[in-house]
Amino acid sequence: MNLSANSSSLTPNVPFDRRRFLSHTGLGLGSVALSSLLAQDGLGAGAPDGLPHFPARVKSVIWLFMVGGTSHLESFDPKPELTKRAGQDLPKEILESPYATENLRRVVANQETRRTKIYPLQIGHRPRGESGLQMSDWWPHLASCADDLAVVRSMWTTDDNHGAQLQFHSGRHRLEGFYPTIGSWVHYGLGSLNDNLPQFVVLGTPLADCCGGTEGHRANYLGPQHDGVQLAVNPEDPLSFASPGKEVYREEQRREFELLGELNRMTAEAYPRDKAVEARIKSYELAFRMQSSVPDAVDFRGETAATRQLYGLDQKPTQPFGEQLLVARRLVERGVRFVQVFHGSTGGAGAWDQHSNLKTGHTKNCAAVDKPIAGLLKDLKQRGTLDETLVVWATEFGRSPGSQGANGRDHHPFGFSVWLAGGGIRGGVAHGATDPFGFHAIEDRHYVTDIHATLMHLLGLDPRRLVVPGRPRLDRDFGEPIREILA
């Protein structure tokens, strides 16, 4: 923009620093609104035309990620053989399975060298719901929703350390570099349902730097306009980096927006084909609206006592995660496309990483999330919005059937479980299988991007058609929809 910052006249030959102007007027926009509008206007790495590719089954996704590696054996894939043969060596034929891919053979070799002793199940399990879906007793509230769940018991990944957290979100091993995450692909592929809110929101503490950090919700080469936007569950300050600050009155801020808008419109008249100017005009207007709409979306104080109790807001262990999931519901019903919710981020590997004291740790963690997750599913269902929302529960890998130390389990990328529920999903099913010890996924095996492809399919997107020129992707990165769990 070529306007003089010092002259009372508007002269088109002196550069005007719009960023400096914003900093001095106290607008505090950050990049949130501008990024959103740049994406809508097709600037940067804007989304391709002709989307969605086919009719969608759902409008939004709530992505729940348990950080650290939840034990599949004590959750959704219980193996009685572990208790029957507790203390024995893992069978050699299990360790030598052809399912141990080349880059994981060293991990298998380590298991064999240690001759890991089988560690018994640490909690009971039984059939749940009319479907008889086997689940452990650490999930009593979610068990009441068993007939809504499609459990995929045959997941596998290639990172045996917590870089698998980033891998689950991007589909790539960390050694391959950083790539767009699943939330960013959804943001890239689909337009806005609500111009007053970010379309990709992150709740909870993101991944630690050791395990991907903010790259766990970043868009990388798609451009920053497709990054996830972190929100706090605090209606007084949900978007601190885009807040004008308490010292700026709303009416004062409105006048500042109007002035900036007028300056930009004058520039747009002088340069009518400048799409960047058009996008920026819209962005400042959106930012002003967002400062009202975002606090309202995260303010659940008007929710009924029954709803608050459903999510566990009346109990200290479940309150933090319950608040996040209640906000997630409020966001999707206001048109947010993708809400990514982290549980267990600790600044390190994560709270679910029980190399020792597995029973104590998983008892505590499950108690913190079980009721809120069940509350979310029931709340969406009773509001009639579960059919248009997909809920995904995931973790980076499972835990080993052998013991680590006296009372823990090691990382386990060879076979583990995730589940999906909501629109387009067959409930009450268990798809795929691990061997009798829960070591290898042996039936209907699925790499992590098959989960990505499944949710994109339900959103009406074909990942093979979401290609950025000059950025080729491998077939495995695209994944395949898991059609056996689709309704």
Image (spheres, rainbow, N blue to C red):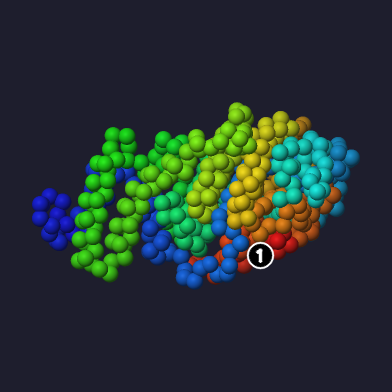
Give how far across and how far down residue 233 sits, in percent.
49, 38
Q: What residue do we see at 71% from left, 42% from top?
A: 142
- For the C terminus, the image quarter is bottom right
Give how far across and how far down residue 42 sits, in percent.
40, 65
Residue positioned most to the top: 316
Q: Nearer the viewer, residue 297 or 168?
A: 297
Question: For this view, does 348 lie left or right of residue 259?
Answer: right
Question: For this view, does 356 lie left or right of residue 435?
Answer: left
- For the N terminus, the image quarter is bottom left
Q: Is residue 6 above or below residue 250?
A: below
Q: Is residue 29 above or below residue 474?
A: above
Which amino acid type is marked by label 1?
Glu
Q: Which image quadrant for residue 320?
A: top right
Q: What residue do we see at 32% from left, 37% from top?
A: 245
Q: What residue do we see at 56% from left, 58% from top?
A: 59
Question: For this view, does 115 lie left or right of residue 193?
Answer: right
Q: Which image quadrant for residue 450?
A: bottom right
Give how far across and how far down residue 89 sits, in percent.
85, 42
Residue 101 seen:
no
Q: What residue do we see at 55% from left, 46% from top?
A: 329
Q: Which residue is mark 1?
A: 480
Residue 378 seen:
yes
Q: How many marks?
A: 1
Q: Nearer the viewer, residue 204 or 174?
A: 204
Q: Nearer the viewer, residue 164 or 92?
A: 164
